[in-house]
Amino acid sequence: MWQVSKIGVKPRMSAGIVYSEEPVTLVGAGILGENDLDLCLGRAPALVAADGGVLHCLPKGILPFRIIGDFDSLPADVLASLPDENLLRVTEQDSTDFDKALRHIEAPLVLGVGFSGARIDHQLACYNALLRHPNRRCVLISDTDIVFLCPPELQLDLEDGQRFSIFPMGPVQGTSKGLRWPIDGLHFAPDGQIGTSNEVVGPVTITADSAKMLLILPRTCLDQVVTALAAQPGSWSAL
């Protein structure tokens, strides 16, 4: 028997949007480590699957609150076995499963797992979606790193010596405190200045002047990032 994902305040559906007052775990069909799903659910217990991501959940006896996608990644027998009320079909073919799911979730934070590994083009498409939906605060988790869109301002309490990488997805400027190499006055761009392999030397405060800056930190920083993002609700508006 499948156990439907539940949280203290149960998610709800309205006009095709999944609303949750608590963080949401979004699972994709990519590579998933043995404990990745449990890692996310311990911090974001409302579970939503992007299309074939549900195949990671069913063997654990868990039925996501919603499965979002065009369902072209699901075997016909699996799709037929899923309750209709748990399915949110998005039939257009102009976006990825991650994009379809992210834009249909409204929550304080989304932890995305199963969207890395195997195919680099899929990972790049996920980073594109983070920029396309800057009002959807989301942290993507891989086996080594976490990636998320820098909000207008972010304060993080990280260990000295921690790797702190910045990758621009478009022209962007910002300021920083607590980094070995400050970014003030730099003009970042995908075909110009980038900021990989910076280093933490104290409490970090970083700002960005547009929703174009990805932050890439070690996976061990997940809890600090989740805490910081929850405490600093300011975010970008929808494009």
Image: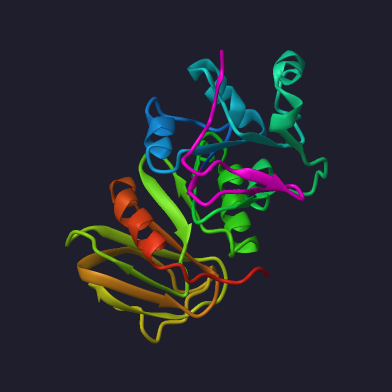
Residue 164: tell me if it is visible.
yes
In the depicted structure, whether residue 25 falls above or below residue 201: above
Q: Please name whichever residue, 94 or 20, is drawn nearer the observer in this view of the structure.
A: 20
The mark tally for this picture is 0
Identify the image quadrant of the C terminus: bottom right
**Image point (36%, 74%), residue name:** 206
Q: Position of residue 28 (x, y in %)?
A: 57, 36
Q: Please name whichever residue, 159 or 47, is drawn nearer the observer in this view of the structure.
A: 47
In the depicted structure, whether residue 129 falls above or below residue 90: below
Point out the residue furthest to the right here.
92
Point out the residue furthest to the bottom here.
185
Q: Position of residue 102 (x, y in %)?
A: 62, 50
**Image point (70%, 21%), residue name:** 82
Q: Please name whichever residue, 54 or 130, is drawn nearer the observer in this view of the structure.
A: 54
Could you tell me what secondary structure mostly forms the magenta stretch? Answer: loop
The colouring scheme, among rainbow, by chain, secondary structure or one colour, is: rainbow
Identify the image quadrant of the N terminus: top right
In the depicted structure, whether residue 38 falls above or below residue 139: above
Residue 115, by quadrant, is top right
**Image point (56%, 43%), residue name:** 120
Q: Position of residue 113 (x, y in %)?
A: 49, 39
Asked whether 102 falls inside the magenta stretch, the response is no
Q: Please name whichever residue, 8 or 20, is drawn nearer the observer in this view of the structure.
A: 8
Q: Position of residue 119 (x, y in %)?
A: 57, 38
Find the magenta span and give its range. Answer: 1-24
